[in-house]
Amino acid sequence: MEIETLPPAEIERRSFEIIESELQQPLDPLLAPIIKRVIHTTADFDYAENLAFSPVAVQAGLAALRDKATIVTDTNMARAGINQQALSQLGCQALCFMADADIASQAREKGLTRATVAMDKAAGLSGRLIFAIGNAPTALIRLHQLQGAGRIKPALIIGAPVGFVNVVQAKELILAGETPYIVAKGRKGGSNVAAAIVNALLYLLCRERADMAGQTRI
């Protein structure tokens, strides 16, 4: 078996070529960069079928990022997986409250998960908000409750918690709502999936800006 030595950019390019050659069905051009980015992250072609997009999800996400959105994650792993250079270039930020001392304290006092309390804290943020949930179904459940109470209005919800308890049910709440969403249906997901979806949106917008800059120079 021969092992090739390739630079990082070439490895990614070749990986996407393989993904495109092995996909069993054509993808909507608007959704394809996100779906392929998740497949690239997970090596799981099931995401070509189980990623669900509301009608204006991609447009809503890009519009929020153009408006310097704050991205709220439910794990520091997801936050760390979001491309910091792209965030900085677009004037956006990513936050995670899960490890904050006040979140842990309130969760113990109230008998709630930290993810639930973290969503309450996020409701106090200003500006456009994108939620990237890759671990805790209770975060999605609390987001649904906060929206119903009129306490929060996300620009986009990325719902990709992984697991067995209340995961499918929590995702169904988001799928049935009116907020733009990108949801990994079923039990699959994870912090890496949530971060990959955010990164795909960031890269789309960075390329858009680079193209515009190129046209300006011509």
Image: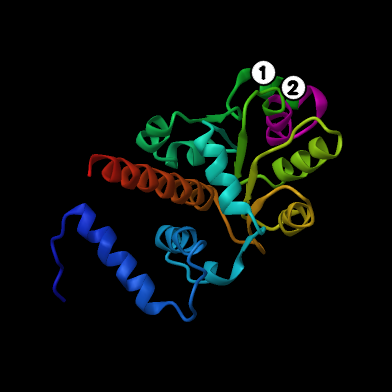
Instruction: Give the quadrant of the C terminus.
Output: top left
Q: Which residues are magenta?
A: 108-121
Give the class, few, some or many, for how many residues have Cα within 10 Å of label 1's Cα (few <14, many ≥20): some
Label 2–label 1 contact, CB within 8 A: yes
Q: Residue at x 62, y 19 (%)?
A: 101
- Secondary structure of the residue carrying tag 1 is helix
Which of 88/11 is in front? 88
- x, y (%) of residue 114? 69, 32
Residue 133 drawn above or below residue 100:
below
- Secondary structure of the residue carrying tag 2 is helix
Please tell me whether the stretch drawn in magenta is mainly helix, strand or loop.
helix
> Is any part of residue 14 visible from this angle?
yes
Q: Which mark is residue 102?
A: 1
Amino acid type shown at disc 1? Asp
Is residue 178 shown left or right of residue 181?
A: right
Q: Which mark is residue 106?
A: 2
